[in-house]
Amino acid sequence: MYDDMLKEMKEKMAPVVEMAEINKKTAETLISLQSDYFSDFVNSSLAQVKALTEVKEPKEAFDLQVKFYKELEGKITGTAEKEMAALTKANEEITAIVEKSMSEMGDLPYFDMDKFKEMGNFDFSAFDMTKYMPEAAKPKAAPKTTARKTTATTAS
């Protein structure tokens, strides 16, 4: 009896476990990419500082800096593209799992998806949610005000 329940629970939780595994792999990929980029950035920055200390002319220093920033931009772009590819892949995999799970839910005999279509016809304006709220959480009614009588004085 318990074996059947455990087996059924594992089957029902399989998509969740699969999505968690996808998230884990994606996080590992992103962390690895960022770590590699950071290490490369530190090393290339140190090399740049060393190269700049050996320069004698301002124009040469300027050229070194331009070259350094162009290389840095290329590395940032490359890392960002790899990260976007990893995120896109994870998104596609998780979307496929969710779509498969939802289509399987529609096949269950006790889960009638057509009943949810009727929700659009429900009149929410007649539904008073305050009936289900504790007294302390209910909104306070605005005090009723009466029209003020004014008398105009006319100058004679």
Image (spheres, rainbow, N blue to C red):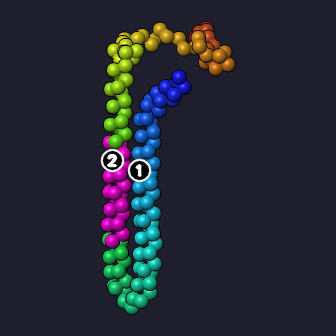
x, y percentage for residue 42? 46, 72
* Residue 149 occupies quadrant: top right
Report crowding for label 1: few under 14, some 14 to 19, many 20 or more residues within 10 A (C-alpha): some
Q: CA distance from mark 1 to mark 2?
A: 9 Å
Camera sees residue 150: no
Q: Amino acid at mark 2?
A: Lys
Question: Picture coordinates of residue 82 (x, y %)?
Answer: 34, 57
Position of 105 relative to 68 (above/below): above
Residue at (45% x, 42% y) in the render: 20
Query: Would you say 74 lies left or right of 148 here?
Result: left
User: Which residue was labeled with disc 1?
Assistant: 26
Identify the element where label 1 is drawn.
helix
Position of 77 with respect to 34 (left or right) is: left
- The quadrant of the rendering that contains the C terminus is top right
- Work out whether residue 19 or residue 46 is closer to the camera in this orientation and state it: 19
In the image as oriented, which residue stretches furthest toward the right? 136
Residue 80 quadrant: bottom left
Residue 55, how many percent across, how many down?
A: 39, 88
Q: Is residue 76 visible?
A: yes
Magenta range: 71-92
Q: Which residue is mark 2?
A: 89
User: Which residue occupies 37% across, 77% down?
Assistant: 65
